[in-house]
Image: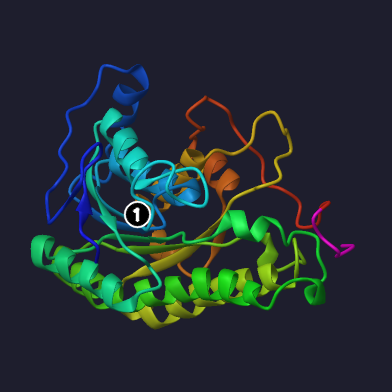
Amino acid sequence: MGGDVRAGGPCASTDRRRIVISNDPEARATAQRRRLEGRIAVVAGASRSIGMGAAVELAAAGAYVYALARTVQPGTGASKGSLTETMELIGELGGQGEAVACDCTDEAAVAEVIGQVRARHGRLDVLVNSVFAARPFGASVGKRFWETSTDLWRDVIDLSAKTAYIASYHAAPLMIETARQKQVTPLVVNVSGRGAVRYRYNVVYGVGKAATERLTRDMALDLREFDVAVASIWPNGNPVDPSKPETPRYNGRAVVALAADPQIMDRSGQHFWSADLGRDHGFTDEHGHTHEAGPLVDDYSRDTD
């Protein structure tokens, strides 16, 4: 583990970031939905995109969040986003947590984070696996498999599915203990998508999403008797209304909806469109927009049905 990072400051050893709520109306409204007060969450890939959204919304809902990623300071990563910015937004919404500079492909580093969570809190309620290298992947969209580099397999499957496996492997014993000792149902959330069941973008993308989806299903079977749930969310990256795309925080609210669902064990092993969760649980994005689930086949697919 590379150490904890406090927004606007240098790396620190194990400092907690405690922040008072702001006067922003959105912050006050979010604080009223603190359904996860007292829970502990770890989010892998929290510097940008859905991982950022999950970290922010879990913290806004009352969970203490460990936000993991490699990019600490703005402008230093391959894409926009950083742990510093994630923590600043958490602060604006009255949340609590800490940023941890961590290469989630480094098993020893991930194990160390989970060890610190155990030592400091003795529980782990939510694990979100959202590691994905969007920028380097983008150049491969629409290409046939022989037209891409074989490095794409490493960039997509090793970076996403493997990191989800590593984090879940090390988190599972603590989550099992949490279920037994705290009489709650911990939850692992993987970020997957329609590429798990239909061709989307390219071959490797589909293989990676299918691996994540199978990981969700089979981990759920292994964990069922221990009262730990596993689910995947499906964002819609090609919105029905292009002027109103799903936001990272909208998908983060989908994670919160699952984590706060008292019947989540009955739904363990399943996937959920974020838009369907929004409809069923009555949440919007931070702009007040609702969204729709997408078709399985669209312009990014070679499937015909």
Residue that carries the numbered disc 1 in the rendered image: 262
Residue 276 sits above or below residue 23 on the image: below
Quarter assignment of residue 291: top right
Front residue of this view, candidates 115 and 10: 10
Magenta-span inclusion, residue 304:
yes
Can residue 205 be seen by looking at this rendering?
yes
User: Which residue is most to the front?
Assistant: 76
Name the quadrant of the C terminus. Answer: bottom right
Task: Residue 71: say if magenta.
Answer: no
Query: Where residue 214 appears, x then y in whole percent?
Result: 56, 77
Task: Please give the range of residues in magenta.
Answer: 300-305
Comparing 274 with 76, the one in front is 76
Q: Residues within 10 Å of mark 1 (few under 14, many from 20)?
A: few
Can you see residue 213?
Answer: no
**Frontmost residue, 169 versus 225:** 169
Q: Residue 110: x, y in percent?
A: 29, 71
Q: Say which amino acid is labelled 1.
A: Pro
Quadrant occupied by the N terminus: bottom left
- Report the residue at 24% width, 31% height from top: 94
Q: Secondary structure at mark 1?
A: loop
Q: Position of residue 134 (x, y in %)?
A: 58, 55
Residue at 34 percent across and 30 percent down: it is 30
